[in-house]
Amino acid sequence: MKLEDRIRKVVPYVPGEQPKETNIIKLNTNECPYPPSKSVEEALNSMDKDRFRLYPDPAAADLVKALADHYGLSKDQVFVGVGSDDVLSMCFLTYFHSKDPVYFPDITYSFYDVWCDVYEIPYETKELSNDFTINPDDYIDSKAGGIVIANPNAPTGVLMPLDTIEEIVRTNPDKVVIVDEAYVDFGGISAIPLIEKYNNIVICQTFSKSWAMAGMRIGCALACPELIKAINDVKYSVNSYTMNMPSIVAGVAAVGDEAYFKEITGKIIKTREEAKKRLGELGFEFADSKANFIFAKHNTVSGDKIFNELKQRKIFVRHWNKPRIADYLRITIGTDEQMGKLYEALEEIVM
Ligand SMILES: *Cc1c(COP(=O)(O)O)cnc(C)c1O
């Protein structure tokens, strides 16, 4: 065997661009346009830096406790990791361990198929309907080895009703259903209450969008104690000290300021509803989004052209050259001021 044949080869996930320039309008990776809570800054400033000599708490117990209290769960129902990408990746490794293919939509978070490839998990994608809704029948009472649903879905923003999620979880009792709720805080309804009822649902959430802390890399999984124990066992078999000290401290401080969290998510929802109106007037079509972005297609101008013209004006949005979605742009909801500049630029481009 040749050296190169012994080496794992994968086609990696491509993250959205993080341009070095600062005078740009960045609407391409669904970050929050507002800063984190003041309490995060205060908590970080008052950290004892001498303690950085030491390893962090491998269980991140303070953050687990803060999240358990926040969600009304017990500590053994909470797992934390380095962003929900880390958490989801550990979930795939832990819960998808059979020959039966894992099911997820053809248009969804583009990391799912990458994790399946790297962990050699068989998978099958199920086509979204033309209106970008997920067809529940593809998942209810399925032959899958596991199921992953982003809710609201990315990059479409479309929300699946909670009773449909429950039907999928209820009719697939012998496999794990992961619900990726990265965007649920922008008007979605969380499936967290189902954790008390079912031992096969795992909910993943992140601090990167609604908590305004993408740079701190914090995410969590919420599930019954047996599933949380299983993922912890895998985590401790890969890397015990995943959460660094500042992230734990910042996460606890953020969760402690729920009023601010409600304020910024409320502002983003308001700006999003205005954006639906403005984009509609500019000739865009989109499915109704319950996330902090809108996935929109213009009725005459191509996605590629709008993407490039916006970029020339230093406005970054996300565009995929993929079948079915090549004419769509995923536009993150920014501040009202940023969105105003976006509408002005779009007027020049599409009118
Ligand atoms: C942003 C995102 C994540 C990952 O977020 P992290 O920054 O790793 O916490 C996971 N799932 C979906 C659908 C996302 O959009």
Image (tube, rainbow, N blue to C red):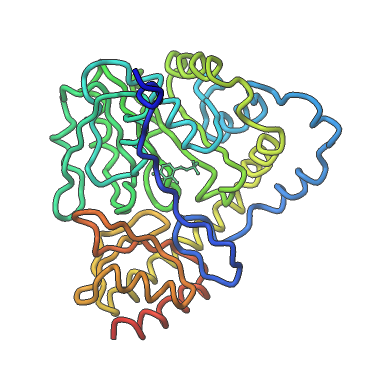
Q: Is residue 77 left or right of residue 160?
A: right
Observer-nearest of 75 and 327: 327
From the top left corner, tell me how far across and down residue 79 is, in percent: 52, 25
Tell me the residue at 69%/23% (across/down): 57
Q: Is residue 316 above or below residue 87?
A: below
From the top left corner, tell me how far across and down residue 2 is, in percent: 36, 22
* Residue 196 visible within the image: no
Q: Is residue 44 left or right of residue 256?
A: right
Q: Is residue 210 left or right of residue 349?
A: right
Q: Is residue 29 above or below residue 245?
A: below
* Residue 40 visible within the image: yes
Q: Is residue 286 above or below residue 44?
A: below
Observer-nearest of 181 and 89: 89
Tell me the residue at 33%/69% (across/down): 276
- Ligand 1 shows up in the quarter that is top left
Tell me the residue at 53%/38% (across/down): 83
Task: Give the quarter of the figure containing the N terminus.
Answer: top left
Tell me the residue at 47%/19% (across/down): 231
Number of disc labels: 0
Q: Is residue 37 left or right of residue 130?
A: right
Observer-nearest of 244 and 194: 244
From the top left corner, tell me how far across and down residue 282 is, in percent: 29, 79
From the top left corner, tell me how far across and down residue 198 is, in percent: 33, 21
Observer-nearest of 309 and 242: 309
Task: Give the quarter of the figure containing the C terminus.
Answer: bottom left
Query: Dividing the picture into quarters, in which one does residue 302 lie?
Result: bottom left
